[in-house]
């Protein structure tokens, strides 16, 4: 019997890749070392746009635009198939620090993205709770958001209904190849014969791939978030100021994000970050000065150079594919990344030019994976917890 396509990692990238392949008629199994979707994809904010999009290279914006277009249908399909509302809401994005207005407007015009520059009066008419000391803003009216935990929960149910095998608490330790072809996965549940597999292990992908001769510059980047007690109708637009953001959820909860810390695989939270995020929230919306923090958590973003993910075949192991390194924009890029990966795997015409997402030539270390061999990733140690 033919083995399934194994997807290593059940975050948003792995789950949407599984859905694409299952919809194309493939037999798919998702393996996750923890519960599905409980890492970065649960921890994130769910803003469906790069923050300050003009600062990103075109390959990131290209996948993001494709994802933005795909989300309304995805949300509708998931609601129909699972009765779960992922809360896709076109709340818009207000950028309150406008020093780069010229670049932003030029980028938006060239990209065909609606963007309006607001003066003092129109800003406060749109968002009366914003600090009166802030007197201008950039408004991206079409930016939407989703609620991450609901999205991964709905996807999980959708995949279950499509007979995708979902295996939790199965950790992949390494790959076995024979004559340059993938032959098996070595896992905590034993050796699984495998002809095709996808590494979608987020911040852990690079470690897993070191044993295959790849050396990726993909460090984990910790982000801490706060969830504030419901403040119904205080704000209805995502606010961004000086790198910090506020995301209003439909039930009045407000998320405050986020730090960027390079502290390895440590997911602990700190009181310093809590105060930093509270101060940032207060600076944007004074009425949040005494807001009660309901939850505080951290997640590990899968870092990558310029935030450009790798969506490619492994250079030395036929049948092994890689989809990782989505850094700060994994939610918004996920539908496009998953489709592009499926196009590659199924030899279909690609939705976008795959060239920018190839593994860089310099990523092949000295110990390139041999013709036949066994690789093992170095197991990262971690502490801490994640969750909205
Ligand atoms: C605080 C924060 C805020 C964010 N905000 C946004 C935002 O607003 N918008 C946006 O687009 N993006 C945002 N992001 C980024 C986004 O969340 C990530 O880019 C995205 O979730 C990455 O998805 P992933 O599937 O690659 O990784 P993950 O969700 O981390 O999934 C990887 C999975 O692989 C599993 N795994 C790891 N190693 C193994 C192994 N050896 N064997 C089996 N399973 C394994 C893990 O358990 C995990 O479930 C944010 C991230 C953070 C942390």
Image: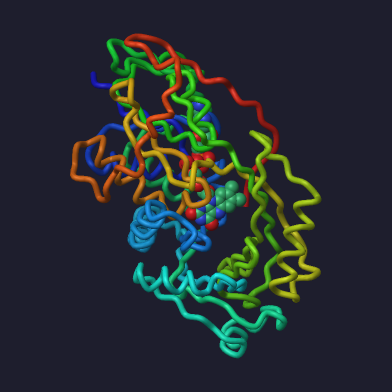
The image quadrant of residue 182 is: top left
Is residue 137 positioned above or below 277 on the image?
A: below
Residue 304 locus on image (x, y percent): 50, 41
Of the 4 image quadrants, the one containing the N terminus is top left
Structure colour scheme:
rainbow
Is residue 127 positioned above or below 7 on the image?
A: below
The image quadrant of residue 310 is: top left
* Residue at the image point whose x is 75% and y is 75% from the top: 286
Q: How many circles with numbers are drawn on the protein? A: 0
Residue in front for this viewpoint, 16 or 356: 356
Whether residue 220 can be seen here: yes
Whether residue 149 can be seen here: no
Is residue 104 positioned above or below 5 on the image?
A: below
Residue in front for this viewpoint, 140 or 110: 110
Q: Is residue 117 left or right of residue 341?
A: right
* Residue at the image point whose x is 70% and y is 63% from the top: 228
Is residue 170 positioned above or below 253 on the image?
A: above
The image quadrant of residue 78 is: bottom left
* Residue at the image point whose x is 68% and y is 68% from the top: 230
Residue 173 locus on image (x, y percent): 50, 19
* Residue at the image point whose x is 53% and y is 61% from the top: 51
Residue 346 locus on image (x, y percent): 22, 36
Residue 186 locus on image (x, y percent): 44, 16
Q: Residue furthest bottom?
A: 121
Residue in front for this viewpoint, 301 or 82: 301
């Amino acid at each position: 019997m033919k083995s399934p396509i194994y997807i290593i990692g059940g975050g948003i990238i792995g789950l949407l890749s599984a859905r694409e392949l299952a919809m194309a008629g493939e037999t798919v199994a998702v393996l996750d070392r923890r519960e599905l979707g409980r890492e970065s994809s649960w921890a994130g904010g769910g803003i469906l746009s790069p923050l300050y999009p003009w600062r990103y290279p075109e390959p990131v914006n290209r996948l993001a635009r494709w994802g933005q277009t795909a989300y309304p249908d995805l949300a509708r399909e998931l609601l129909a198939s699972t009765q779960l509302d992922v809360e896709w809401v076109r709340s818009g994005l207000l950028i309150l620090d406008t020093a780069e207005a010229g670049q932003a407007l030029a980028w938006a015009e060239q990209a065909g993205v609606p963007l309006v520059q607001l003066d003092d009066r129109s800003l406060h008419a749109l968002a009366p709770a914003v600090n009166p000391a802030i007197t201008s803003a950039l408004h991206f009216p079409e930016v939407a958001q989703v609620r991450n935990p609901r999205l991964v929960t709905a996807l999980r149910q959708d995949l279950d209904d499509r007979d995708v095998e979902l295996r939790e608490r199965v950790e992949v330790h390494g790959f076995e190849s024979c004559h340059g072809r993938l032959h098996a996965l070595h896992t905590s549940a034993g050796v699984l014969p495998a002809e095709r597999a996808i590494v979608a292990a987020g911040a852990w992908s690079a470690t897993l791939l070191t044993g295959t001769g790849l050396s990726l510059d993909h460090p984990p980047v910790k982000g801490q978030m706060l969830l504030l007690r419901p403040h119904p109708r205080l704000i209805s637009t995502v606010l961004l100021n000086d790198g910090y953001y506020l995301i209003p959820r439909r039930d009045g909860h407000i998320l405050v994000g986020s730090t960027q810390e390079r502290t390895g695989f440590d997911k602990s939270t700190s009181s310093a970050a809590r105060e930093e995020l509270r101060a940032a929230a207060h600076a944007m919306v004074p009425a949040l000065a005494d807001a009660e923090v309901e939850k505080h958590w951290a997640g590990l973003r899968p870092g990558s150079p310029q935030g450009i993910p790798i969506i490619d075949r492994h250079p030395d192991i036929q049948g092994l594919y890689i989809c990782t390194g989505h850094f700060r924009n994994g939610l918004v890029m996920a539908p496009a990344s998953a489709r592009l990966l499926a196009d590659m795997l199924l030899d279909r015409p690609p939705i976008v030019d795959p060239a920018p997402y190839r593994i860089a030539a310099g990523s092949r270390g000295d110990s390139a994976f041999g013709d036949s061999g066994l690789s093992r990733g170095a197991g990262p140690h971690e502490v801490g917890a994640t969750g909205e």
